Image (tube, grey):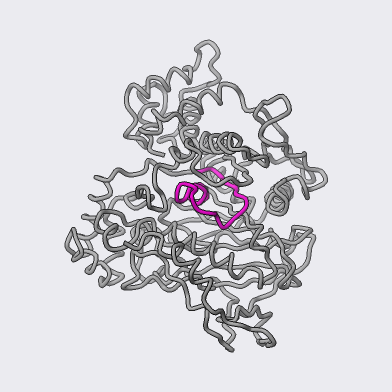
Amino acid sequence: MLTGLFSVLLPSLLLLPRNTNAGRTLTSPLGPVVDLGYAAYAGNTTSPTGVESGPVTFFGNIPYAQPPLWELRFRAPRMLNERAVTSHVDDARGWGPPCIQRPAVVGIGTEDCLKLNIWKPTNATEGDKLPVTVYIHGGGFYYNSPQGFPMNTWVAQHPGGVLGVSMAYRMSLFGFLGGSAVAADGDLNTGLLDQRAALEWIQRHIAKFGGDPDNVTIYGESAGGASVVMQLVAYGGSKPVPFKRVTAQSIGFGPTRTQDQIEAAFASAAAFAGCPTSGKEAMACLRSASVGALVSAVNRVPNGAFALVIEGLSGFLPDLPSRLVAAGKFSQVDFVGGHCTGDGKSFTAGKPQDVNTEDDLRKAVFSRWPGVSNATIAKALALYPAPGAPGSPFATQYDRASTMAGEIVFTCMDWFVAESLLAKGAKNVFSYTWNAPDPAIYATTPYRGAAHTSDIYYLFEGTNPFGNAGNTFTPFNTSEAALASEAIAYWTSFAATGDPSSMKKQASPTWDTFVSSENARRRLMLERGSDTATNSGMENVTAAEIERCRFWMSEEVTAETRI
């Protein structure tokens, strides 16, 4: 079995004779060149508008592993031949192609997508040792691509200089096909292994761009936030991680599938692709199948069938992430975790007028969590007093339902990771809530408030992702621009020093650590304000919210939610 092959081979590969580019200077009429020895890339220099610092050079479509085609389908990413020496300069001025999405369309996206993108200050050179920010995109592990998350503003704005990196990774059937046949003749969670391969490539090569491999921070939102957690708990914390800090935004995943569900999804996919439904014959057929056959399988198997797989003790993901966190089986890092105040409203079935009774609430919340027992639901309802009951903070059943839907994972998972890091002795632990709506989402569904993904609208130049790697960008108004600039300053300051306030905007409040001197739990609420200043400020996490989060993160309940 090849589980974790890339990471297993990496230490020995690093001992092999390396290429050298000493004494040579490669140039290109296309743009500035970074020479890695085995490859050289010409980038594109731009000057982002509306930011204080200097020009940024972009390098895109850089392979970080061999194309995962044919015999390499459903296997861990294989390392490139990095001992070669080249005198050719590749054009790296454009984006790499997106990975195949769901719904899948032949010709949109490709299997040969294991590419990354790098932004650096144009004047950054090897030896500068600038902090490195790495973004892992979300999209439910079945759609999206780096193109919707440009990092040039992060790099241009930060006064001390940082690098930005983003990566594509295999998704849906291509990245998360599971089952005993895959375990016997392939690798599980190859999408997560792709992410780790990209992070290992950064360790080997980012210094050539002016970055510091010893000061890498990974970021992600939704499935990207889940990916950050998976990288944190990888191998049960038994192996060193290729990063120093993490920022997990609106951590979203689950319920993780059972083995029976995984086997059923494999059999369905194989059948739709015209292959045997079990054994080595199935894997051989799937590896030789046309892209069109696999695209058909992706579209015909229900959405959500291909996602994270629990592998067992020797695997990348040996247990449910919540269990690994609870057991302290993760790497100690600096941490920022938070969520949007409307995350739960984005995952409550129906509109406010559709949720009027407790039966409505049960359907609106727990249709997403079919493994949750009636006994657990009854306990949850008692923790969330009905509207009108003494002490209830909920004005309507919809408010009650959406709070519950958000806290099951999006709100309470970041609290849980923060608490577990504190228990392990971590010091630089910070928390936040995002209370500024994405105006494009708000215009169509105002009842969702600061809906899921609202934060990425501000962090990535007004982006609104949609299916098949498509994105739109909406120009900021002045108050939106003020919050965007403030948030990017916090996010990049954390990467530079472990303290999001170290290079904050002058008018921005100080972002205090998660634990105050009075031992209360504190977080920053980010919110729009005027054209020149935001309304952001620190707030306490209430005792009632902490009690509810202890419930959702308890071993008894996570065994049912499977997060």
Residue at 31%, 59% (x, y): give it.
Answer: 298
How many tags in the picture? 0
Nearer to me, 384 or 107: 384
Residue 142 lies left or right of residue 514; in this view the side is: left
Residue at 48%, 31% (x, y): give it.
Answer: 402
User: In the orientation shown, which residue stands out farthest toward the right?
Assistant: 506
Up/down of 241 relative to 90, above or below = above
Q: Quadrant of the N terminus?
A: bottom left
Where residue 304 sits in the image (x, y, percent)?
A: 35, 49
Determine the image quadrant of residue 369.
top left
Residue 320 lies left or right of residue 491; in this view the side is: left
Where residue 274 sits in the image (x, y, percent)?
A: 19, 65
Nearer to me, 441 or 486: 486
Where residue 515 sits in the image (x, y, percent)?
A: 67, 31
Residue 226 in sight in this render: no
Up/down of 477 relative to 387, above or below = below
- Range of magenta residues: 228-251
Residue at 43%, 44% (x, y): give it.
Answer: 253
User: In the orientation shown, which residue stands out farthest toward the left?
Assistant: 276
Q: Quadrant of the C terminus?
A: top left
Where residue 251 sits in the image (x, y, percent)?
A: 51, 43
Residue 264 lies left or right of residue 142; in this view the side is: left
Residue 427 in sight in this render: yes
Nearer to me, 313 or 93: 313
Residue 48 forms part of the magenta stretch = no
Up/down of 402 relative to 81, above or below = above
Residue 490 lies left or right of residue 306; in this view the side is: right
Residue 234 forms part of the magenta stretch = yes
